[in-house]
Image (cartoon, helix red, strand yellow):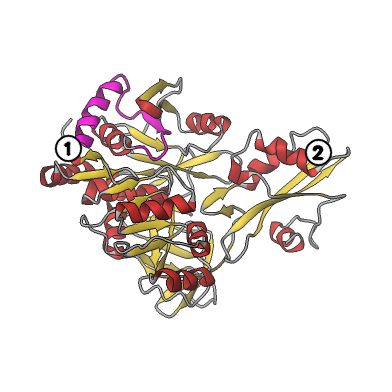
Amino acid sequence: MKATDGLLERWETILARKGDAPAIFNTRGQINRTFRAIDEYACKFESKIDSFAAGSVIAVQIGNHEDWPSILIACLRRGMIVLPLEQSISDQQRDAAAKICRASGIIERAGKVRVLEHEQPNWQGNNPALLKLTSGTTAAPRAIRFGSEQLLADCEQICDTMGVSDVDLNFGVIPISHSYGFSNLLTPLIARGVPLVLSQDRTPRAVLADIAKTDATVFPGMPLFYQAFCEMKNIPPLPKLRVCISAGAPLPIATAKKFRDKFALPIHSFYGASECGGICYDREAKNEIEGFVGSPMKDVDLEMIEPGAETSQVRVRSAAVGDGYFPDVDEEKLGNGVFVPDDLLARHGSGFKIVGRISDVINVAGKKVNPAEIEERLLHFPGVRQAVAFGRPAGAGLRNEEVAACVVANVDLRENELMEFCRTALSGWQVPKRIFIVDSIPTNERGKISRRELAKRFR
């Protein structure tokens, strides 16, 4: 099929210019794919999905596999919609996501395509290119609709703001299935020709050794990696590494300063959201203010909803903002090129710092956890009659949390029994770190339960 959208047109340009150049490396520094090989695999993969109609949703659950760009290109050419799924989610959550997004098939490791019996959505002539999964306001997940042009806009904003080009080498350990990995690793390869190393080993010692071994120049990471790097002895030299990015959770200032002293490299805080891609980036990376996320990305406009207030939610406007949620709609939060995050921001100089949030969604190292999912699971345990899940601070940082819960039961229970029960159906990051068995759930003066107050009480 002829390339008719922005990403495919850009890919054709990259392919013509860099066809035989290395595109994907393994962690030993060996070439896994050239740009031409990516395209050849894409052509082969088209034959595996030719039984699906245009407009079908195809879930992809393959981890950080070298087939990812080929699969995306093949689906774009066939007019299909890609639904990335993380490998670490439970089978129950995978099946629920596929059902809600009406996926016609799922691509699993080794290129296996499994047909799913779901009715194809009616896109009414406005087919998206990608569905990003996120938490909804209930226990059920929902997705965000993106067109190819919005994905391209996010890629442009990221590469231009961060100064990443095709002479760089991205180190890919963050999941491609996550919005952060998709936008910082996959689309820069397709639209800008930025090669990458794909890693399956998330052990910090191995990650640091592989960054050195492969001569990677750009590392999109998370605070947990930088914290671990700072504690290591006998570190390898990193003469090629020039851009260190931290996203998914707040970067503690102490970690940033220790890393700079140890590696002579600054860490740039990156603030974004699944609904709109990149929002802010700390270009100078002085790391002097807790919660500081820098100034808006190139071509991103932030408007304080309450201009006179010390803290406020913001409206994010950019060409990268998603079209809306699926299957439900929430135009006040996302639509018409505008997204309103749940975070509360305050101006600081020419940039912004995050000072809190208004939603109950729990941020566990960048993963959104809906309390309703944990509560629903706990209430299935025999004898549990009330359950409230909440996020509480996990170390330094205002947005980095761990899951906790309070439970009221009419039988004798043990905390470890409840936690084991949660592990059988929830993903690892959703399982509470602590479950407090109480006689009653504390309420406020209006008789309502406040998750924020519970977080303070059970800090």
Q: Which residue is more in the foreground, 289 or 156?
A: 289
- Disc 2: which residue: 384
Q: Earlier in the sequence, mark 1 or mark 2?
A: 1
Establish if 261 lies above or below 89: below
Q: Where residue 305 sits in the image (x, y, percent)?
A: 48, 68
The answer to whether mark 1 and mark 2 are in CB contact below 8 A is no
Q: For the point 84% across and 50% down, which residue is it?
A: 438
Q: For the point 81% across and 56% down, which residue is it?
A: 442
Query: Where, quadrant-wise, is the C terminus in this rendering?
Result: bottom right
* Magenta-span inclusion, residue 449: no
Q: Which residue is more in the foreground, 443 or 42?
A: 42
Q: Where residue 317 sits in the image (x, y, percent)?
A: 37, 61
Of marks 1 and 2, the one in the foreground? 1
- Disc 1: which residue: 36
Q: For the point 36% across and 40% down, which residue is it?
A: 130
Q: For the point 53% across and 50% down, which residue is it?
A: 367
